[in-house]
Image (spheres, rainbow, N blue to C red):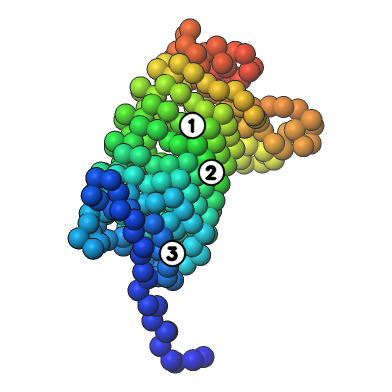
């Protein structure tokens, strides 16, 4: 076994672009650091945005710390960062773009700032190891495929005030079914509450909730393993009845 010390990783470099308001955006990063702390200021300009694809497909970064003052994380900013495990976002952040963290397959920790009102399209798609996600109280929309295939998220509480559930936004999430029971070969049912504030559910694609795949494979039976908790007469109540999903009135 070698006793030589590890070769130190040189500090990475950022490229920025000027914004109309006199601040700047991180446009790209070049480097192999495992922990990246994005600077709050560069060249005398305050950093307020992470640009489109700025860190896309970086294979080295394991943790990113975004500084206070950043308001926008653009489309694909961290898409495909296959080693990324943790992201720390500031409360100043109000907008996270489509596919910002898509295919970050070992992402485990992410905080959503309280001023986020929309989970953008494919924002966290295929983040398979993300176990916990707390929604901001002001969240009003979960867009198409936002949490598609986040199968480690087994508990999820939708906030009162949420209005829109997009196409396949929760498809194949762990909250769509319960654990495997002792002595059984498949998943048990899980209860999932949809607030009465939801006024639109997009049923396109495969729908919102995954069917029980093993039953379909073995018996060609399309079976949901979720029991929706809904208010009488709500959009969610009508959706459950239409889709023949088990439900209980609360």
Q: Give the CA separation, mark 1 to mark 3.
A: 27 Å
Q: Are marks 1 and 3 in contact (CB under 8 Å)?
A: no
Res. 90 mark: none
Residue 57 drawn at (x, y percent) = 52, 59
**In which quadrant will I find the C terminus?**
top left
First-in-chain label (1 vs 2): 2
First-in-chain label (2 vs 3): 3
Q: Give the CA separation, mark 1 to mark 2.
A: 11 Å
The residue beneath circle 1 is 143
Image side of residue 160 versus residue 120, left or right: left
Residue 228 drawn at (x, y percent) = 52, 22
Within the image, what quadrant is residue 215 found in?
top right
The residue beneath circle 2 is 125
Dot 2: what SS?
loop
Image side of residue 178 versus residue 32, left or right: right
Dot 3: what SS?
loop
- Please tell me which residue lies in front, 9 or 126: 9
First-in-chain label (1 vs 3): 3
Q: Residue furthest left?
A: 44
The residue beneath circle 3 is 61
Residue 137 drawn at (x, y percent) = 31, 30
Within the image, what quadrant is residue 203 found in?
top right
> Residue placed at 40% from the left, 17% from the top?
197
Residue count near mark 3 (Cα–Cα under 10 Å), binned few <14, some 14–19, many ≥20? many
């Amino acid at each position: 076994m070698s006793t030589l010390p590890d070769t130190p990783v040189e500090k990475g470099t950022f490229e920025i672009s000027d914004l109309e308001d006199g601040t700047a955006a991180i446009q790209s990063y070049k480097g192999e650091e495992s922990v990246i702390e994005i600077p709050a200021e560069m060249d005398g300009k305050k950093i307020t945005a992470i640009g489109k694809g700025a860190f896309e497909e970086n294979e080295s970064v394991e943790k990113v710390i975004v500084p206070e003052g950043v308001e926008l994380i653009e489309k694909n900013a961290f898409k495909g960062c296959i080693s990324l495990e943790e992201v720390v976002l500031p409360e100043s952040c109000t907008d996270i773009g489509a596919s910002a963290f898509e295919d970050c397959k070992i992402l485990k920790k992410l905080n959503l700032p309280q001023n986020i009102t929309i989970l953008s399209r494919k924002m966290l798609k295929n983040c398979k190891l993300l176990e916990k996600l707390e929604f901001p109280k002001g969240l009003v929309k979960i867009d198409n495929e936002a949490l598609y295939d986040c199968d480690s998220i087994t508990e999820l509480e939708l906030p009162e005030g949420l209005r829109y559930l997009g196409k396949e936004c929760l498809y194949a999430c762990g909250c769509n079914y319960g654990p495997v029971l002792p002595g059984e070969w498949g998943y048990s049912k899980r209860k999932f509450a949809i607030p009465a504030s939801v006024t639109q559910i997009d049923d396109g694609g495969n729908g919102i909730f995954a069917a029980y795949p093993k039953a379909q494979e073995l018996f060609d039976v399309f079976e949901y393993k979720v029991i929706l908790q809904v208010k009488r007469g709500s959009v969610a109540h009508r959706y459950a009845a239409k889709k023949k999903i088990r439900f209980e009135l609360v």
